[in-house]
Amino acid sequence: MKGIKFKDKPLGKALVEYGESPMAVVAFCIVVIFILAALFASQLAPQDPYDLASLELMDGTLEPMSESFSGSIYVLGTDAQGRDMLSAILYGIRISLSVGVASTLIAFALGTSMGLVAAYKGGRFETLLMRVVDLQLSFPALLIALVLLVILGQGVDKIVLALVIVNWAYFARSARGSAMAERNREYMEAARALRLGEARIIFCHLLPNVLPSIIVIATTMVARAISTEATLSFLGIGLPITEPSLGLLISNGFRYLLSGKYWISFYPGIALVIIIVSLNMMGDRLRDVLNPRLKR
């Protein structure tokens, strides 16, 4: 293979077509900004919001742009514990993106591998795998995640594992469907005629040709994983208070909404909506570039 092509397009041409949509470029830039904010949260945050020694209860529930007890300014206000909301959001973005990206990458590797092997080998393994996939996808993903977390408990590793179990089936079904259309093409027949190993045929020849459609799913699946984690944390069964995500920050401020302290939930909620919408817009544009027949 001379490199991955997107529906017979060179990579460079596909990137140029992606850049023809201003909204898609804006969405990409927003995602990059969020990633940088997550990577450098400890350097960008004015305060370590989870260092108890740096918190001052006298600064609890201060409004945005209020002056702190020590004289500094809280741009987005504070929560009931006196934590700077800007700092809490930066750390929350790090947790949310870490959970979303890690669970998607693992689900991608697991589901894609199983889907490709099933499509290439066929037989009983393919039948069994697709029955398991169909059975899992017949249940709501959130319900499965709820049950798993009740069993596994709280923690970043637990919720990543739950999201992998929930999401791998989407990749397996997509990879198997794309590979079915590729497995009998000329380049596959040539690879088999050369007596190449099955693993080499599957992962060096078949995978690059089904990868574009799976990339689209992976982009939107990160957003799906982030929103699922936020929902679970909001319900109190996702991440513990010591590892707060954007969903947990929203949950912490929900009780104060009726008293007018909107900023504790509002700003983390805005950040969550922006990152999910941006990832979905990227996925929509990638879908249009990789499969022009789906353009609206």
Image (cartoon, rainbow, N blue to C red):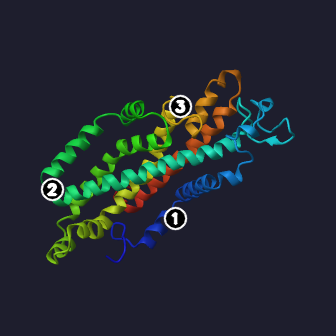
Residue 130: percent from the left, percent from the top? 21, 46
Residue at the far top in the pictured view = 258
| Residue 122 tag number | 2
Q: In this figure, what is the number of numbered marks?
A: 3
Q: Residues within 10 Å of mark 3 (few under 14, many from 20)?
A: many
Q: Earlier in the sequence, mark 3 or mark 2?
A: 2
Badge 3 marks a residue whose secondary structure is: helix
Left or right of 207 in this view: 239:
right
Q: Is residue 280 visible?
A: no
CB atoms at circles 1 and 3 under 8 Å apart?
Answer: no
Residue at the far front in the pictured view = 53
- Which quadrant is the N terminus positioned in? bottom left
Q: Residue at horizontal 63%, vertical 45%?
A: 91
Residue at the far left in the pictured view = 123
Q: Earlier in the sequence, mark 1 or mark 2?
A: 1
Residue assigned mark 3: 234
Residue type pointed to by label 3: Phe
Residue 185, image quadrant: bottom left
Return the residue nearer the eye: 214 or 241.
241
| Residue 19 tag number | 1
Q: Earlier in the sequence, mark 1 or mark 3?
A: 1
Rounded to the nearest angstrom, the CA distance separating label 3 from label 2 is 42 Å
Residue 116: percent from the left, percent from the top? 25, 58
Residue type pointed to by label 1: Gly
Q: Is residue 84 visible?
A: yes
Q: Residues within 10 Å of mark 2 (few under 14, many from 20)?
A: few
Q: Relative to 170, is 202 above or below?
A: below
Left or right of 245 in this view: 138:
left
Residue 252, image quadrant: top right
Q: Relative to 282, is 271 above or below?
A: above
